[in-house]
Image (spheres, helix red, strand yellow):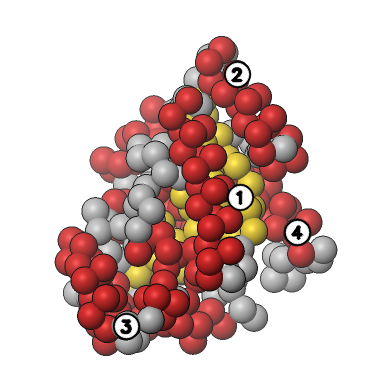
Amino acid sequence: MSAKTIVVGNFKGGVGKTKVAVMASWELAHEMNKKVLLIDMDPQANATTLIARSAGITEIESSIFESFENSDLSKSVLNVKENLDLIPAAVSFKNLPKFLYGKFSDDIDQVSYLKTLLEPLKKNYDYIFIDVPPTISDYSDNAMMAADYVLIILQAQELSLEGAETYISYLQFMIDEYNAYIQVAGVLPVLLRPGGRVDHATVERAKELFGEDNVFENYIKHLERLKAWDITGITYKDHHDNRAHQIFIEVVQEMLDKIEHFEGGEVNGE
């Protein structure tokens, strides 16, 4: 077994990429019985906060930056729940660029450090998700080099569409410059309001730009429950929770189907 590694991104902030990275990891582990690792590569640590809150974790002793300094990611792996592990981020991770430039003189070594550190862990998981800041940076470079697939998040507005276009251009740059081997798993529309004309017009434009087959049929709809989870953590209290979970389960299944199509075979570990 060697994990499929998926980076979740867009170059516009606030589009829901962290929520998607967290929930895709959560549903794969909880509902689909897959072994999952979520890597928080964002110094703001929003993914870490949401996962910890959901699992009742109040203290985190080590973060990804210490693992980078010690050349060993395993020391920061935190078991969240059955089948789900987290490599948490912290504010100290803002020093990553300075650290990489001090440790490596070669450009390819700088952008490939996460990939190198992640390799020994891949045998332990079915899927690895990487959440990154919405910037062209050392964080994104390392995530791209380590990943097999990128899931592009598209909020239904023009700036997010432009951010997705930039992401594709950036992906091509990484392929050309560093021989990155990464596929687009798809473009996932998020935060759609029922009946919103602008929302659906943006999705139609995305289909024209990226190809209809590359845009997910399942959308992450605008749900108040998703906002509530930021405060309470992920819950299973009522039908509103169940509805929100079901949306993410359907999205994850479509993502797995798309990856299976790319690979021409079974990717669900069966």
| Picture layout, residue 71 above or below residue 259 | below
Q: CA distance from mark 2 to mark 1?
A: 24 Å
What amino acid does circle 3 point to? Phe
Residue at image mark 3 = 104
Mark 1 and 4 residues: CB-CB less than 8 Å, in contact?
A: no
Q: State the residue lying farthest toward the right.
A: 264
Residue at image mark 2 = 201
Residue 118 position, x and y percent, is: 46, 79
Q: Quadrant of the N terminus?
A: bottom right
Residue 261 position, x and y percent, is: 78, 56
Residue 106 position, x and y percent, is: 38, 81
Residue at image mark 1 = 252
| Picture layout, residue 173 above or below residue 229 | below
Of marks 3 and 1, the one in the foreground: 3
Q: Residues within 10 Å of mark 1 (few under 14, many from 20)?
A: many
Residue drawn 60% across the image and 42% down it: 187
Residue drawn 63% across the image and 47% down it: 186
Residue at image mark 4 = 262
